[in-house]
Amino acid sequence: MYERNGLSDEQCPENILEEQCAADLNTWIPKFIAEARRSDGEPCTPKTIHQILSGLLRYMRSIKDDCPNILDKSDPRFRAIQRTCEFVYRSLHKEGVGVQVHHAPLISIEEEEIVA
């Protein structure tokens, strides 16, 4: 394994989702969470990151029904995943990522009468 600037160039196992080793998942998924970006380079919203993690879990369950639940907050094997999510989500919210609320346009009384 080659190291530069104190960082390892170790590669994530290609079959990490199929093998479902809790230690590997707890090592590599936090790295993914910390580096997740949209195709334009902007950070993903916390909701998007959670949806990606849910998709990974769904894929793992399609392979093996009794796979470990990486989103289970009570499972100590995945504490690094939970802590990374909490830290990244908090940081993104502080930067204003994913905090915009979209309100539906109001309907006037006249428009309501037309619909009714």
Image (cartoon, rainbow, N blue to C red):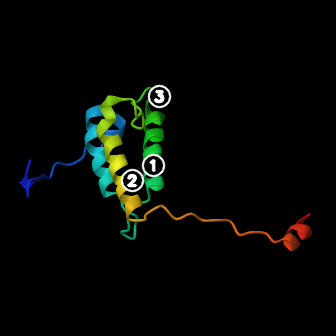
Q: Tell me where residue 51 appears, x and y as whole percent.
A: 48, 49
- Calculate the distance from the C-alpha at mark 3 to the C-alpha at mark 2: 29 Å
Mark 2 vs 1, N-terminal side: 1
Marks 2,1: beta carbons within 8 A: no
Task: Please tell me the numbered disc located at residue 65.
Answer: 3
Q: Element type at marker 3?
A: loop
For image coordinates 41% across by 30% down, the residue present is 67
Looking at the rendering, in which quadrant would you find the C terminus?
bottom right
Q: Is residue 40 left or right of residue 15?
A: right
Compared to residue 83, the image places residue 20 above or below, namely above
Q: Element type at marker 1?
A: helix
Task: State the residue position of label 2.
Answer: 89
Q: Is residue 77 left or right of residue 66?
A: left
Mark 3 vs 2, N-terminal side: 3
Q: Amino acid at mark 1?
A: His
**Residue 81 sits in quarter:** top left
